Amino acid sequence: MQERSSVGELAEQLRRELDRYSPGGKLPSSRVLVERFRVSPVTVSRALAQLAAEGLVVTRPGAGAFRAATRASAAAPAGDTSWQELTLSADGTAEPVPRSVDAAGVLVSLAAPPPGVIEFNGGYLHPSLQPERAMAAALSRAGRRPGAWGRPPMEGLPELREWFARSIGGPGGAVTAAEVLITSGGQSALTTALRALAPPGAPVLVESPTYPGMLAIARAAGLRPVPVPVDADGVRPALLADAFRATGARVFVCQPLFQNPTGAVLAPERRGEVLRIARAAGAFVVEDDFVRRLVHADAPPLPRPLAAEDPDGVVVHVCSLTKATSPSFRVCALAARGPVLERLRAIQVVDTFFVPRPLQEAALELVGSPAWPRHLRAVSAELKARRDAMTAALALHLPELALPHIPSGGYHLWPRLPEGTDESALTAAALRAGVAVTPGRPYFSAEPPAPHLRLSFAAVAGTGEITEGVRRLRTACDEVFRDGRTA
């Protein structure tokens, strides 16, 4: 059983038993709870911490855990917060710029499903695929480095910037360390880039479909996402040129490698065309290279990042270590050249000052260790096996789901549902059947052309769980199709 599931189950059991104790009464010791529930001391500690955060228990170091005293509380008078609606939607100019913060599309892949539910909606590697020992060793070594707990350079440690520059531009020096900023994860880097490149109210061109987190960033900044359709070869250049002309946009955000959610790779003949179109429009291309290190074992040689082929500073490049390590290992590079680099740096400093030095030192220790290439090879082989298991299970149990493209990198599939399928109904039915899936609607900034699901194979325990998850999804589809929730 996963640790987080054990923690939740133990917390719920203790929550039900709290009535046995009077306020201030002492709960059984951690040793007793470990023996009674046959869980680890870490699980007990985390379950008690969860109850303490809920105000149900009080923990006292050296003494134990106690039921919290009941507090009588009077209902506070209801205030009038309606004034905030106008304040939050206006920017102080004559024409208010709509600004909404909708995290729903992001929370789908961040929220842990209930215990026993198979996680096809996850956006990160399962703990069994994460290099936990290598990260722990790297963090331990990093903490002992001279000056490890001091203030780092605002732009990031020079050695880490150099490592990212080589990984982005290759050995030829197409990208230099001076053109790299270290940021706290890809989401933070994308936020910095959009704030630097577009004023509130401006249009920003996005792939359609695209990553919901990027759409949330754009809308929260008061920008207007404009969709540009993608196909199996990535964004369509003719439509990109039309979108630049029609909107006057000065930013295009894309994922040229294993695009989320389609898995498409930008075709060789389109790469230079995209850069030429953006340059002619006087626009930037924000390249989100988020899963380059999650390539599958059977993938052909990968194309270089667009940033490595861009001498004119058109590309603002984002790449992170998070997807290949752990959701908590939030170390990312933001690369650009020209005057825009200073603006990116200024926003980065104002927002976060700097990425904590121990984490940067740990990143250096990790990527410089022999464990790093071994980890990448193991993940590459395992992701291929999981992808193959999921495609085989879908073909066997759900042949009515179309799967036009099978990617050779990344961590998910993008099947198309039968026309008229109610995505929300199917998502809810799947959860009742014991599998969490991601509906396709949040990936579109405008009306979607068809219903889809995004199915992740990276966040589950293994291929056996994939097969069982698809079987449960079959049950959900039978329920929805039987009830006529399709056109």
Image (cartoon, rainbow, N blue to C red):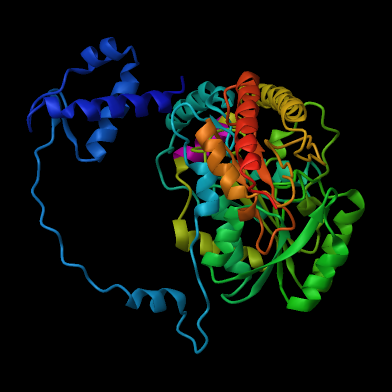
Q: Residue at x 71, y 74 (%)?
A: 249
Is residue 33 shown left or right of residue 306? left
Residue 148 image position (x, y, % from top left): 44, 37
Residue 13 image position (x, y, % from top left): 28, 25
Is residue 26 shown left or right of residue 94? left
Residue 124 image position (x, y, % from top left): 57, 36
Q: In this rendering, is residue 16 above or below 341?
A: above
Q: Which residues are magenta?
A: 358-365
Residue 427 image position (x, y, % from top left): 57, 43
Can residue 158 be seen in this snapshot? no
- Residue found at the far top of this picture: 35
Which one is nearer the viewer's eye here, 340 or 148?
Answer: 340
Can residue 65 be seen in this snapshot? yes
Task: Say which quarter of the image contains residue 239.
Answer: bottom right
Q: Residue at x 17, y 28 (%)?
A: 18
- Residue found at the far front of this picture: 483
Which one is nearer the viewer's eye here, 308 or 195?
Answer: 195
Task: Say which quarter of the image contains residue 55.
Answer: top left
Task: Say which quarter of the image contains residue 397.
Answer: top right
Q: How many marks?
A: 0
Which one is nearer the viewer's eye here, 245 or 326?
Answer: 245
Q: In this rendering, is residue 33 above or below 431?
A: above
Magenta stretch, main secondary structure class: helix
Q: Residue at x 82, y 32 (%)?
A: 299
Q: In this rendering, is residue 2 above or below 56?
A: above
Magenta span has 360? yes
Is residue 454 shown left or right of residue 295? left
Magenta span has 427? no
